[in-house]
Image (tube, rainbow, N blue to C red):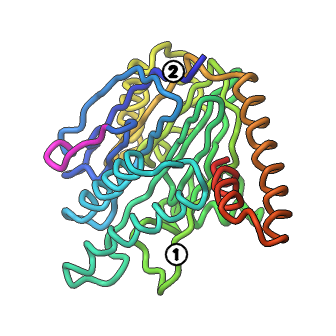
Amino acid sequence: MGLKIDTAVYSHIGRRKNNEDNFFLDGLYMERDQMNKGGQYHAVKKGDEQIYAVCDGMGGAEFGEEASLRAVQRLKEYKEKCRQPDNTGNLNQMIDEASRWIDDISLAKGMESGSSGSTIAMLIMKDWYFRTVNVGDSRVYRLRGGLLERMTKDDSEVQQMVDRGEITLDQAWQHPRKNVITRHLGMPMEGEALMPSVSMRLDLNQGDRFLICSDGLSDSLHDSVIRRILTEQHTPQATAAQLVRTALSEADNMGVASDNITVIVLDVLEAGGQDADVKRIRKLSAARAGLAAASVLLAGGIGYEVFQLIQFLNSSY
């Protein structure tokens, strides 16, 4: 049994003049002329490797729109060309390259480095496991067995306060500086690489429900409300629509102009179970054993080509 995902996305401009959000739906994203219109999309995707993401641009005027668009364009290229898209080293390189490309927007306009930027919250699914990648304060949540869990940690000032034990998560949600982020794609790095937060490979279960969202949702809705909607609504389409409608309503009730809101809801209909796990472990064990044997041969001055081949196979896992 392979991987089968039922997914829906809803992007809404909110009460803003332009939509700086974009998304990546395993190959689909919004072109520039579609972003302000937003829209709803639905797909049932099969395939042992799938990638989803939400990107929230910043910089004002057209700069935020261009930043998030470049982020998803780079992600599409990455999915199409990278042989190991879930590899940590490849992910680090892709994020850094996207960040530098986004910073070119600022530099080309004669602005300071880092003037335009984008967040990214990314979910990679591969047969029996998933990984998350994030920079900024867009989020990935997982609903499993009725328990809602944040799978990413915000790069923000208030999250640092939470980590230091100065405030609680509930206090962070209401904090006046909750929108101040500490990292984003396009930030000046002074020659260093921008390193994203990349999770371990975590097990993927049939029945899991994931949510990827920009802060237009999480700023308006407490996690308890998000959990209730994710639990009550049956289809990804209905869930995504209800999340957006509720966030818009709550922002209006609080007397604030809603930010752009983009959500992706993903239901795991099928996942490769323990058999896929066992096969992978056996392959990995065999590759490591071969690597050790090749190292012995190499020490004796023979077998260099074999060593290179097995080293490549080992790195694939």
Q: Is residue 112 above or below residue 70?
A: below
Instruction: In the rendered structure, find residue 4 and report the number of the disc placed on it.
Output: 2
Q: In this view, does 216 lie above or below 165?
A: above
Left or right: 98 in relation to 291: left
Left or right: 316 in relation to 138: right
Q: In this view, does 293 lie above or below 265?
A: below
Which region is colored magenta?
Answer: 28-34
Q: Would residue 56 be visible to someone looking at this image?
A: no
Residue 297 position in % (x across, y down): 82, 63
User: Outermost residue, left direction?
Assistant: 33
> On the image, numbered disc 1 is attached to which residue?
193
- Residue contact between numbered discs 2 and 1, judged by CB atoms under 8 Å: no
Q: Quadrant of residue 295 in the image? A: bottom right
Q: Which of 193 and 89 is in front in this view?
A: 89
Q: Residues within 10 Å of mark 1 (few under 14, many from 20)?
A: some
Task: State the SS at label 1.
Answer: loop
Residue 247 position in % (x across, y down): 41, 36
> Who's the residue at 32% across and 49% down the image?
21
- Specify the amino acid type for callout 2: Lys
| Quadrant of image for the N terminus | top right
Task: State the SS at label 2.
Answer: strand
Residue 69 position in % (x across, y down): 28, 54
User: Outermost residue, top direction?
Assistant: 234
